[in-house]
Image (cartoon, rainbow, N blue to C red):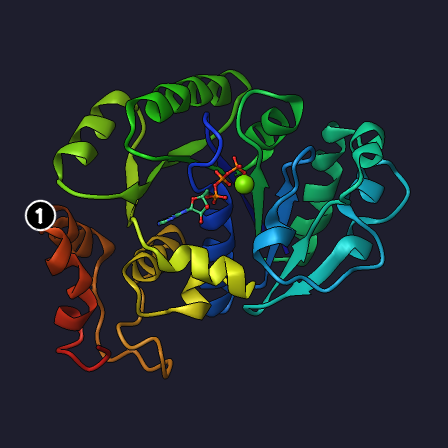
Amino acid sequence: MTGRVFAVASGKGGVGKTTTAVNLAAVMAEADRSVVLVDYDLGMSNVGAVLDVEPAEATLHDVLAGEADALDAVAEARGEFDAMVGGTHIEDFGRADPSKLREVAEDLRAEYDVTIVDTGGGLSHDTTVPLGLADDVLLVSTPQVAALENTAKTLDLAERVGGDVTGLILTRVGGSAVDVEAAVERIDAPLLGTIPEDGAVADSEEAGEPLVVYAPENPAAQSYRELGYELLGESPPVSFRDGEAEGEVSAGAAFAEVADEDEPERQSLLSRLTGGRLG
Ligand SMILES: Nc1ncnc2c1ncn2[C@@H]1O[C@H](COP(=O)(O)OP(=O)(O)OP(=O)(O)O)[C@@H](O)[C@H]1O
Ligand SMILES: [Mg+2]
């Protein structure tokens, strides 16, 4: 088996990379793929802070230090997928060799349908390595100008290291459709999806679960579901609660509706799609 490797990257920190990585992992698992999420923010590992992950035999840092095999650092996370998290000691950072991710990714490719690599912000070595080896680089940004400018730099960097940039995911999108248009103009990559601002994201982190598991019918969860299935080249089942596909909706059509509507309308997107069956 040769699995597909995604890298989730951004220029600026705190824009929603980890949220995106965790939720895409959960959605792709829901779509019956075997999935492993790798926390490649080697300095400030944070997947473990937002997701309950059982301790594994080894940490990612042990693997990158050549002291353990990749699969020894894989543990179960809530949401039907596996996760590989780093150690939490400062010394861990010093002994890890970021370029070892290449070997780790090859080992994971052989084992999983999908590997999702969450990265740190900025231009450090541990950010650059995943950009070069992923089959799909997913850029994450909020619609704010500063974040977009840094995202343009990350796009440039990804291209320089021979990365395959699939497109841009805009997160924490608030009010009007104007933000989205401005963003699309600034970044020379396809817009893959938009994720609305959703207060339940913080609650799901508190609960240690992906949002798509914690509050599946919430607007951001629904957007992550559409995005995840779209990336797999499939349409999401409309009725995800009982796993019965009662109809199909294209992510493109749903996005057009979201972009055109005001905030209160967006809350009821799912309701309109499902005829009110799910809330
Ligand atoms: N759609 C959303 N709606 C509301 N809050 C969100 C959303 N997405 C992310 N957040 C919040 O934004 C903050 C940053 O998110 P996240 O940790 O995913 O970003 P990051 O890019 O991984 O950050 P870092 O660069 O520090 O690793 C978190 O507090 C998270 O709860
Ligand atoms: Mg993060």
Which residue, given by chain and number where applicable, does mark 1 sit on?
260
Q: Residue at x 19, y 27 (%)?
A: 182
**Beta carbon at label 1 within 8 Å of ligand 1:** no
Residue in front for this viewpoint, 248 or 58: 58
Task: Tell me if 229 is positioned left or right of 42 in this view.
Answer: left
Is residue 31 visible to the viewer in this orientation of the structure?
no
Q: Position of residue 167 (x, y in %)?
A: 36, 35
Residue in front for this viewpoint, 14 or 68: 14
Task: Locate the N terminus by quadrant.
Answer: bottom right
Is residue 101 visible to the viewer in this orientation of the structure?
yes
Task: Locate the C terminus by quadrant.
Answer: bottom left
Residue in front for this viewpoint, 37 or 13: 13
Q: How many marks?
A: 1
Q: Name the quadrant containing residue 264.
A: bottom left
Q: Name the quadrant containing residue 106.
A: top right
Task: Tell me if 253 is positioned left or right of 165 in this view.
Answer: left
Q: Position of residue 229 (x, y in %)?
A: 37, 58
As shown in the figure, which amino acid type bears the numbered disc 1? Answer: Asp
Q: Secondary structure at mark 1?
A: helix
Q: Residue at x 82, y 28 (%)?
A: 94
Q: Position of residue 245 (x, y in %)?
A: 29, 78
The local crowd at label 1, few if under 14, some if 14 to 19, many if 20 or more residues have their Cα within 10 Å, is few
Q: Residue at x 53, y 23 (%)?
A: 122
Q: Residue furthest right?
A: 67
